[in-house]
Image (spheres, rainbow, N blue to C red):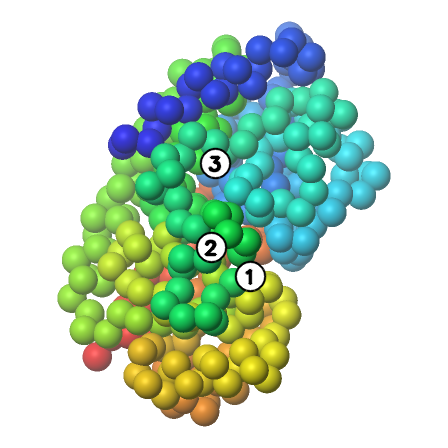
Amino acid sequence: MRYLILLVPFLIAACGGGETRTLRRGETLRVIATTPALASMAMAIAGDDANVELFGPEGGSSHDFEPSVNDRRRLETAHVLLVNGLGLEGFDTAKVAKSARILHVNCSAGFPEDYLIRGDQTQDDHTGHDHGPGEHNPHVWLGTEGALHQAAAITEALAIADTAHAQGYRSRFEALKIRLEALCAEYKPKVAALKKRNFVSNHDAFPYFAREFGLKQVGVIQRTPGHNPTVEQRRAIERMLSNGHAHAIFMEPGYDDAASKIIAENSRLPLGVLDPFDVGKPSADGLENVLRANLETVLKTLGP
């Protein structure tokens, strides 16, 4: 994949300062990730060679998590902090990692500009997320290509921090790559066969997912995650729906879905649930399960 070769120079540079805490003899690598998706990919790559934890509560959103004093203390016994970047985290991740003297890995560094989707170009109208000009949508892990770019960054970070187990990390990454590419190959023709492919989502989480699988996200209900639309914004969405531009509305677990339900009822559109996996419990197969479930939901909701 063309994106993965860009990662190694970045990661070597990230490790070159010599100020991060190194792994001691007999010590197990400890990795902390800011999102369930990153933690899940790290678990799949780590196997039994490293311990992976989520930074923040399992039921909390990655968008508005702010580390407490206790959270920062947890970092002081870890070795690697995996972050999504692209403006997803609401705190200065590099500063927090530097203070804890651990390796800071921006898993979205190195994406080519033509892969990233600007937040102000995601939608066809003005019902989209409030991204500033030029700001990129951060939900890259919801496309398999974006997920594998991040997984490659995780792999090289773990291999650098724990050279004794580098080969194991890299072989498990290859296995993950095979599984994700197979999932993509399985579902692309199924989604391509759908006659209806346009949808509105609860918030602006799915442009990479939509692009990869030939869908079209034509609007969002919550411009800011967790905040219901104003009356004016709701009317704009309902006008767009009345013109037949969308074929379904997708809610999300972990967010207030009252507005989505009312809009779906008024528009008489089918309603489903897509999981952006920025809330939830990580596991070694967590991201794969979420992507497969999302694709099955798409087929069921938009299918005949």
Give the CA distance from mark 2 to mark 1. 7 Å
Residue type, mark 1 in image: Asp
Q: Quadrant of residue 302?
A: bottom left
Residue designated by label 3? 108
Q: If you read the primary sequence from the N terminus, does the residue marked by circle 2 or circle 1 appear first?
A: 2
Which amino acid is tagged 3? Ser
Give SS at disc 1. Answer: loop
Left or right, residue 185 beside residue 111: left
Rendered view: 121 above or below 107: below
User: Which numbered dot is residue 68?
Assistant: none
The residue labelled by disc 2 is 119
**1 or 3: tag closer to the N-terminus:** 3
Q: Nearer the viewer, residue 60 or 197?
A: 197
Q: Which residue is mark 1?
A: 130
Per the image, label 2 sits on a secondary structure element best described as helix
- Asked if one can make out residue 252 in the rendered structure from this viewpoint, the answer is no
Q: Earlier in the sequence, mark 2 or mark 3?
A: 3
Q: Position of residue 161 (x, y in %)?
A: 56, 16
Note whether 16 is above or below 66 in the view shown: above
- CA distance separating discs 1 and 3: 21 Å
Picture coordinates of residue 99, whole percent (x, y)? 76, 25
* For the residues bearing labels 2 and 1, Cβ distance under 8 angstroms: yes
